[in-house]
Amino acid sequence: MPRYEKTTDLDNELATVKTFGVAMGYGYAKKQGMISYDFDLFKGDDVAAYAEVKVRSNKHDKYPTTMIRQSKVDAANDRLLKTGLQTFLIVQWKDLLGWCVMTGEWKVEKAGRYDRNDRNDLGLHAFIPLEAFGFITATK
C-alpha cells in the first residue's frame, strides 16, 4: 500500500497535536509505523489517551460531518475496551482546531477519496457530525 504522507504533513500533524496538548494539558509522543492512531497523549509520565490527527484544507463548516475510516473507529473502540483510555480525533481545519471522542457509534457508509485513483482509499467510513466536536482556537 503506498504511503502518501510527506514531511510537511507530519509537521502539520505535530503542530496540531502540540496546540491541542497545550490547550488540554497533554504531553504527546508520535507513534511510528502504520498503526490505527497517531499519538500517545500523556498526563505526567502516564499514557492518558490516544489521538488520531487530521489536517484538512477546508473550513470546518464546509461539510456537516468529518469522515474517517471506520477501521480506525473500530480500533479506538477496541482500545477503550482493553485499556479504558479514550481516543480523540483532533482535526485542524483551515479556520479552527476541533476535537471529539472518536469512540462510539457513528453513521457509516462506503466512501473515500477519489483524487489519488487508489482503490485502498475507498471503504467503510464513519461520519462524525460537527456537533460532536469541541473547538479550541481560531488559528487562521
Image (cartoon, helix red, strand yellow):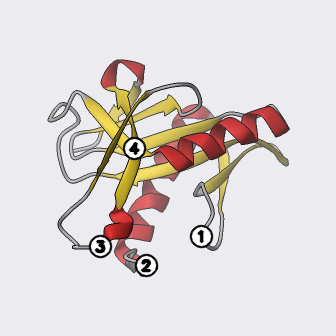
Quadrant of the rendered image containing residue 137: top left
Residue that label 4 marks: 125
Residue that label 2 marks: 3
Inter-mark Cα distance, 4 to 3:
16 Å
Q: Is residue 105 left or right of residue 6?
A: right
Residue that label 1 marks: 34
Total number of numbered labels?
Answer: 4
N-terminal label among 2 and 1: 2
> Marks 2 and 3: in contact by CB < 8 Å?
no
**Amino acid type, label 2:** Arg
Percent across and percent down for residue 120 are: 38, 68
Label 3: state its secondary structure.
Answer: loop
Q: Residue at x 49, y 40 (%)?
A: 89
Q: Nearer the viewer, mark 4 or mark 1?
A: 4
- Up-down: is 70 above or below 85? below
Q: Callout 2 environment at 10 Å: few (<14), some (14 to 19), or many (20+)?
A: few
Inter-mark Cα distance, 4 to 2:
19 Å
Label 2: state its secondary structure.
Answer: loop
Q: Residue at x 60, y 41 (%)?
A: 74
Q: Nearer the viewer, mark 3 or mark 2?
A: 3
> Marks 1 and 2: in contact by CB < 8 Å?
yes
Percent across and percent down for residue 33 are: 63, 74
Inter-mark Cα distance, 3 to 1:
17 Å
N-terminal label among 4 and 1: 1
Q: Is residue 125 left or right of residue 64?
A: right
Residue that label 3 marks: 118
Inter-mark Cα distance, 4 to 1:
18 Å
Q: Residue at x 58, y 58 (%)?
A: 38
Q: Is residue 79 left or right of residue 138?
A: right
Number of the label disc, if any, that sits on residue 128:
none
Q: Callout 4 environment at 10 Å: few (<14), some (14 to 19), or many (20+)?
A: many
